[in-house]
Image (spheres, grey):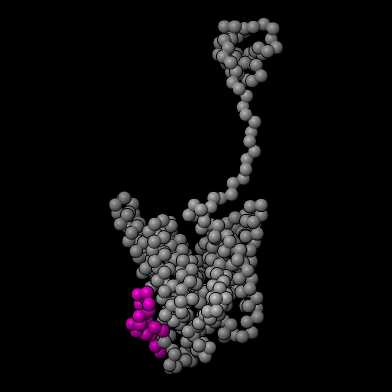
Amino acid sequence: MGKLLHSLKEVTSFITIILFLILILLAIGAMFYGLYYLPNFINEPYFGVPIYYLTPAPILVGALIGIYAYLWYIVLVIIISLSFIFFFFRQGVKYFREFAKKPFSYKKNGFQEFVELYSLIFFLDLVIVLIMSSLSYSPTNPIPPSYPIYALMLALLHASVYEEFMVRFLMLGVPVFIWRYLESRSSGFYISPVRIFGGGYKFEVPEMTFLLISSTIFGLAHVSSWGWWKFFPAFLGGLALGYLYLKYGMHVSILFHFSNDFISIPILLNKSLSVSAGLIFIVILLAGLVFTVSYSIRILRFFGISRPYKKKISKLPPPPPPPEWINLKCPNCGGTIFTYLGDGKYKCVSCGTVIDIKNDDQTHMA
């Protein structure tokens, strides 16, 4: 039964990955289209990106406007593109090779985990919205329907990179690196400075502590503009982003943030995509239910609350009782050292003569 469930999960993951690739390639295409589209609005009043600090409430310290905002957009396009290329060719290609060899076997791959977490967060966000609605609380959206698409493209792409620097890098990567660096100095081990950008960490006390702190700050940072209902999905999203940051690196958390925020832009630019994209989102949503159950079990096992399933092994019959001590003498060589063969049979170590004391009328006593 366990193998069947794993096989179903792997097939679900594969379908979700294919659909996710379609969505993210559309988003990346829309991002590149923005290089041509945005210059038409450089002199518009909404053409700018805020520079702020989280304490955890956002504190505005400045803004990039006009041509500076567009140049920053170009930098963001480069960062997102490199993040996708590096992650896909390092993890995505590896996943498809493994799937081609053993499609129904359990895999532990970063690209697969990335898509599963994306689907899981998407599903949990909807659950939270439904719960809030059932409690007669109407979730608010600070972005008005009349907000220009160009301004939305600037803001969402900016958030994908800037918030990962402010939260995951400064509040998670830096303190964890300092902790591990001081620990390595005392123990004599070397830790690479590149580790400050995440990747390769184990989830022990320092990592878990700063993961919870940074995710809480990330959740609170959304409260001032969205309301308290946004804390919960933002907190869960922060956990997923922090997990990917620690395990795979900052470029993966940036790509995850981009996938979550910028994925709606292609539909806004081209309304004809709404039906097909909507069907893809429905499938990803249903897959999110499967992954929610799967990752819940993993979390319980991580904290020792649940144990992995172990197949019952049928008991073997008890071994035969050892023979009573008996002094023998080999009739051929006179040897006295024998190997017991079972069922009353003894084999002389010196010459190999077998003596059956049950059926042999002659007793060979030493």
Q: Residue at x 52, y 62 (%)?
A: 110
Pick the quarter of the image with the C terminus: top right
Residue 82 pos. (x, y %): 47, 71
Between 169 and 188, the residue placed more toward the observer is 169
Above or below: residue 311 compared with residue 91 = above
Between 173 and 309, the residue placed more toward the observer is 309
Residue 39 pos. (x, y %): 47, 89
Between 208 and 254, the residue placed more toward the observer is 208
Q: Residue at x 32, y 54 (%)?
A: 183
Residue segment shown in magenta = 49-67
Q: Find the residue positioned furthest to the left.
A: 186
| Secondary structure, magenta segment, majority class | strand
Residue 336 pos. (x, y %): 56, 10
Residue 353 pos. (x, y %): 63, 13
Residue 56 covered by magenta stretch: yes
Above or below: residue 23 compared with residue 289 = below
**Residue 350 lies in what quarter of the image?**
top right
Q: Residue at x 64, y 61 (%)?
A: 11
Q: Is residue 51 visible?
A: yes
Looking at the image, residue 301 sits to the left or right of residue 314; the answer is left
Q: Residue at x 42, y 72 (%)?
A: 218
Residue 123 covered by magenta stretch: no
